Image (cartoon, rainbow, N blue to C red):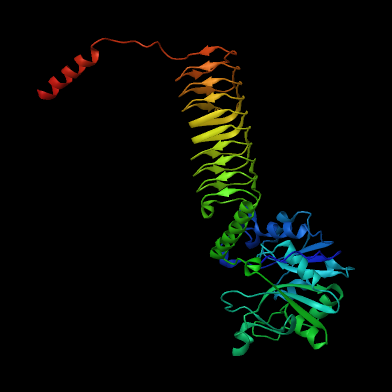
Amino acid sequence: MSIPPSPPRADFAAIILAAGQGTRMKSARHKVLHEIAGKPMLRHLMDSLASLAPARTVVVAGALRDQVEAEVGNRAAVVLQQPQLGTGHAVSQAEGALTGFDGPVLILYGDAPLVPAATMARLLAALADDVAVAVLGFRPADPGRYGRIIADDDAIRKMVEFKDASADERAVGLCNSGLMAVRGPDLFALLARVTNDNAAGEYYLPDIVGLAIADGRRCTVIETDPDDVAGANDRAELAALEAIFQRRRRAELMAAGVSMQAPDTVFLAADTEIAADVTIEPFVVFGANVRIASGARIRAHSHIEGAVIGEGCEVGPFARLRPGTVLGRAAKVGNFVETKKAALGPGAKANHLTYLGDVTVGANANIGAGTITCNYDGFFKYQTIIGAGAFIGSNTALVAPVTIGDGAMVGAGSTITGDVAADALALVRPEQTQKAGWAARFRRLQLAKKGS
């Protein structure tokens, strides 16, 4: 059962921890910049956070800080944790950036990108009354080596790392996600008291809960779905996050009226927009910047990116729509057709085996099989214009720049290098000749040679 979102706390700050080395990714790219549905993990998290309008956001970076700064831009302050001495030490690096701020502080992790805004809001709302720290807990199918939360209902009695837990404590299924909300005046005062007296010699953020409880303060836990707080430390976990995102987004779209015949075979980008009454057949992949209007049908094995598809259009099967493609109402792009920077007017059709690049196609024009717009001379791209109602015969090469007028016809097999006037017929091919009986004489001659 979904939990309705609580209203966000006004005037809160957020700290996003993104200082980890990410060595298990085995990549020159920072861990939090690896993509889910074509969008960096950090951006997923920051976009969800932005919907709650935090007063300040601080990202704590370490290795590859320049990459993090490039992604963050002016959306947040970036501070450095160097060396990395644990999560408590990481949060403490944000103190200078939050000077003078005394509202609630939300602590998030850049490699846990799928936390819903509603869950963030619930965590902030849990700081009501006398609560010093609110912790986000979850109950995974396999608690493994997660830290445990020992609580009476929602009141935390103890938080313990797995390696320090007793057998009874390890049997508890409530685990610590690491996400928490802390009253601003308390956060850095508690962190200043955290020690590194542990096997790793690190300063652990969860230790502030024990310190607050020892002070007689109340700390509370709220629970969320394990998928909300799933993180990625290696490529396999990254793939698992992708699966969570795809499953959730497909479900959202189907609930909004989109039909998917085999949902598990459809792959969406983070920004894919699909209206109600669109049908998506199996094995369709969406890249970034795709918008599809109501009534369209995307047939199997199509790949679409950077395209706007109008009402009632049909795409595929086996079509590839590249960036800059715009299909007008009821246009059709059929099997083994590739488009790029192609605008097809209402009712225009390219049904099979065609390449349309840097082209404008008028309403109700028909593009025959095997047509190619020759748009590139090795140095520059050129535009082709095909008028409304024009008919382009099969196996035609349109050498850009060229214009085919409204209602014009181009005969099959033509190579068009000059403009064609409206309502004209263009033919570019030698006259057909026929030699009576030639084939029979040829066969007799060849058979005689073969028998000799």
Percent position of residue 49, x then y:
75, 60
Q: Residue at x 59, y 78 (%)?
A: 143
The reply to whether residue 41 is in sight is yes
Q: Residue at x 16, y 17 (%)?
A: 444
Percent position of residue 191, x then y:
79, 78
44 w.r.t. 166: above or below: above
Total label count? Answer: 0
Q: Is 382 or 331 nearer to us in this picture?
A: 331
Percent position of residue 1, x then y:
66, 67
Left or right? Give the position of 325 relative to 284: right
Q: Residue at x 55, y 46 (%)?
A: 280
| Picture quadrant of residue 243 | bottom right
Q: Residue at x 79, y 73 (%)?
A: 126
- Work out which quarter of the rendered image holds the C terminus and state it: top left
The reply to whether residue 15 is in sight is no
Left or right? Give the position of 378 relative to 97: left
Percent position of residue 354, x then y:
49, 31
Q: Is 328 or 381 nearer to us in this picture?
A: 328
Report the residue that reaches farthest toward the left. 452
| Picture quadrant of residue 169 | bottom right
405 w.r.t. 313: above or below: above
